[in-house]
Each structure stands twice: as structure tokens, then as C-alpha cells.
Amino acid sequence: MEEQLEPNEMIVHLGPQHPMQPGPFRLNLRLKGETVMDADIELGFIHKGIEKILENKTYLQGITIVDRICYLVALVNEECFVGCTEKLLGIKPPERSQYIRVILDELTRIQSHLLGMGEFGEFIGFVSMFMYAIREREEVLGLIDMVTGARVTHSYLKFGGVRDDLPDGFKEKALSVFNNLKKSVDDFEEMFHTDRIFRERTVGVGVLTADAAKNLGVSGPVLRATGVPFDIRKNEPYLVYKDLDFKVCTETAGDCFARVQVRINEIRESIYILEQCLDQIPGGPLFPEGTMYGRRTPVMRVPAGEVFHRVEDPRGEMGMYMISDGSDKPYRVKIRGPYYPTLQALPPLIIGTTVADVAAISGSMDGCTSEADR
Amino acid sequence: MDVAEILKSLTDAFPEAISEATAESEIRAGSYVDKDKVKKVCQYLKDSLQFDHLCSVCGVDYIKRNELEVVYHIASYNHPVVLTLKARLPRENPEIESIVSVYWNANWYERETYELFGILFENHPNLKSLVLPEDMLGEWPLRKDYEGFPNKTARNLV
């Protein structure tokens, strides 16, 4: 980048440690005055080698490792890994376990979107937003804690089911949390819609059209904000999502404001899904009856084969490609995280904007560098 | 569009390049592709069969067969079918065409596959390491015969 430097131009490194970033990555900007002429990203500051680690751990140990891909959405990562293994094993969890998993996935989506909104507010100088959002998120984390016994890394899912049943009084507690959450989300929406500074910082900033978004390969709220109704829960239903009633939230503007609006609507939609789940959840066992799943077994061997399984992460499409050679450890696991293509699409989006908008655009992507690096 | 239709259209268009085309389920299909024709096949998939979304590109090391495989997962924003295209490469000097000109977001996936497996992507616009430090280039850590970075892993320190 240095070689092409013209007079009056300079290079600014944002990161690897910078308050505006969701994790360490380096953004090199070539600036002319305030305008970004060129941008490029360096990754790898928290590369953990999870794909290699998984090859050397048994499947059961793998559940603990995939939690660490991104601690914010640990349960969705687990769902993807366990779903892959279950497809290879040819088993299906009983309906009660599937409902519990949907409940946890949706709670994860709510808390991730709340943190994403809060961080976004912080990046553009609206620091109180972070405080408001983190307060509500703590209540949701309390619900997850009630079920799994942990706030961020859970190791809760097991092959063929889940580790524990829902605790007593979960439904009442959850419904009271949702009542408060609905009010807060309405407040947030009103705040975003009426705050003049917030609107000026976000409306029309970082506009992505539907064709461009498809071409860049993004997914999740960033894509849905451009008007493409792409959601793995609808396109390729897993667990019991096909029995549940929900809509795919889309906006048409494709700017930073639309992305935040999609997240707000998705929180409401997730609460609606959760209410249905709490009403409909059937009784019954947590693991398939008459099998060894759920009991302590010394070694679990998985039949040889390969599978590609996709789930809807709060940030988009999460996929894993797993190859088994018939032993007790996976032969190869490829993790396809949703933020990886989204982060890759950041440089083309910020070229031509000003430095102040870089924080707004990058923040509206709701990133997690830990997952992009793996 | 269903799986059988897609596979038929693909094998009719490229009778020599596509082999072992199988439908695994209603929404999953797989096939092997000749390594010289990858780009043309991807272009056809994108233009004619609505496969406009590249899920991932990854490498797999089959050390017993002395082969590397590059695996492309190609999906669509319109239909739920995911096509798994695989290309076989030798373990010595593996080279394959880059598909960045077809799918823009293949850029990082190919860079990552290059640094982890040593698979060279021809005509890639910017083939350098992405997640690993530059001095680890040439180690190819995700190959099965990798034994730790010389003098830099914990095992070698003890």
C-alpha cells in the first residue's frame, strides 16, 4: 500500500487494538484528507487453530472446543457441531430436546443482537446505548445461566439431546423477562428513530444493494437489510423450526440504520418464537429411548462419511463440513463462520467514505473477530 | 429446482469434467470435478443454475491416498440445494485454478487454504498468508504429517 502513496495521502492503521473493533484485526486505511482511498485487512491476531485442535480431540471433547469459536454464540456453534455429528450417526433428538435447543438458540440470538446494538451505539459515540443494552442482555444471560449453568461457554448440548432438562419455574421467569425486554426494545426503537444525531450517523451510510450483497457473499442481518429474505431457519429448516410460526425480517434500505432495524425486529420475532416454544414444548425423554446416548460411554465411534450442515447464527449462515473416517475423532472439520465473508466485504464498503463513517459501518456489521480467525 | 435436475444439467454440460455425481439427499449433492475445469464449471453453475452463493472453499489431506482435495460448497440464495464440488490434486506441487473471478468471496477462502495446505491457486489476485504469521508459510499446518513448528511449539521447548 505504501508504494502507491500520492502527495497529501497518508496511511492510518486502525488496530489491531482499537476501541471501535469487535476484536483484534488490523485495518490499513490510505487516506486523502478525511476520505478513505483504499483499505485492506490483516487477520490472524487471535487465530486459535480450532480446526486442527478438533482433529485431535474426540467428538465429545469437540463440543467444548467449538464453544470457543465465538463465546457470544456458543450455543449456536454447538448446535452446528452436534447437528453434523448427529447426521453422521443417523440419530435425531426427541422433540423435547429439540424444543430446548430452539429455546437456547433464540435466547442466544437475542443476547447477541442486544450486544451488537450496544456496541454499535458505542462505536458511533452513543455510549449510553451500550449500558442500556448490556442491562437487558444480562437478564437474558440469566435465563441461559438458569438452564445451562454458565453465562458464556456452556458445553450443554450432547449427541442426541441436551444435558439437563429445563429447571422449575423457567417459564414464569422467562415470560417476566420477555415482558420487560419488549418494553425496552420499543424504547430502543423509539430512541433510534427520534435521535437526530443517530439518524444522521446511520441513514444512508454504508449502503449495500441486494445485488452487491449477494456478490460479496454476505449473509444474516447485513444481507436481510438489503431486502433478500435469506434465512437458514426458513430455507433449510433444522430442529423444529418448521413447526413454528415466524417471519424473516427484512428491510430495503441496506444502510447502517436498516441493519439495526433488522436486529430490533429479529429480537421481537425471537421472543415470539420463544413464547410459542414455551407453550408447545412436549414432555418426554431428553435422549432417544433404547440407545446409549446420554449415558456415560468410554468411546463413541462415528461411522465413516461426510456431511455439510448449516444453521442460522445471529450473524448469518454458520456451516460445518465434517469428515469422519470411522474412528473416535473427526478426520477434518471445516468451520464456515458467518462473519468471515462479512468482514471480507468491509474494505469495498468503506472505500470512498470518511474516517468517521468507518466506525459506523464496521460497527453495524456486528462482528466477532474471534470467529473470523478461529 | 431439484437435485436430479441440477445434476443432469451439470453432467450434460460437462460430460468429461464431472464424475461421480451423486445426490445425497433432497438438498445435498456432490460430485468430483476435473481440476482444469473448475472455473468453467463454477461459471456455469452461477450463470445457469442459480448457484450464486459460495459457502466455503477448504482443503482436505488424504495422506493414505497421497492426495489433497479442494472442496467447494456452493449454495444459492434462492433454493436450498448445496452442491459439494471436489477436485483431486497430487500432494506434491498441488495447483488449481482460482475462482475469485467467479465468486468474489473465494478470495480469503483460497488464501487460507493456500497457507494451511500449500495448495497454489493460479491467477489469484493476492495470494499471501491470511491467518498465520508469514514465517510459518511452507509449514502447511493442516496437512496430516505436520508435527509442530520447529522450535516454536511447547513440545519442542520442554
Image (cartoon, rainbow, N blue to C red):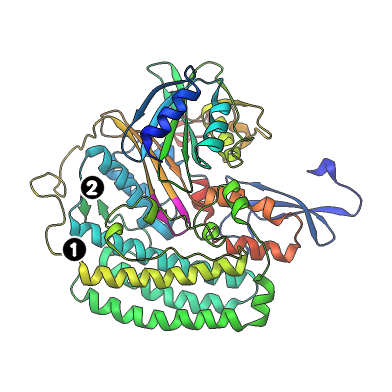
Location of residue B137 with respect to A337 vertically, above or below: above
> What's the magenta region?
A311-317
Q: Residue type at mark 1: give it.
A: Asp
Question: Between B41 and A294, which is closer to the camera in this rendering?
Answer: B41
What residue is at 15 percent from the left and 42 percent from the top? A297
What residue is at 19 percent from the left and 57 percent from the top? A95
Question: Between A369 and B84, which is closer to the camera in this rendering?
Answer: B84
User: Magenta includes A312?
Assistant: yes
Q: Relative to residue B4, is residue A280 drawn left or right?
A: left
Q: Position of residue A111 (x, y in %)?
A: 42, 68
What residue is at 49 percent from the left and 57 percent from the top? A220
Helix, strand or loop at mark 1: loop
Type of secondary structure dominating the magenta stretch: strand
Helix, strand or loop at mark 2: loop
Q: Which residue is mark 1?
A: A165
Q: Position of residue A116 (x, y in %)?
A: 51, 66
Q: Residues under labels 2 and 1: Cα distance? A: 15 Å
Question: Between A332 and A321, which is closer to the camera in this rendering?
Answer: A321
- State the mark number for residue A27: none
Q: Could you confirm whether marks 2 and 1 are on the same chain?
A: yes
Q: Residue type at mark 2: give it.
A: Phe
User: Magenta includes A106?
Assistant: no
Location of residue A206 with respect to B86 vertically, above or below: below
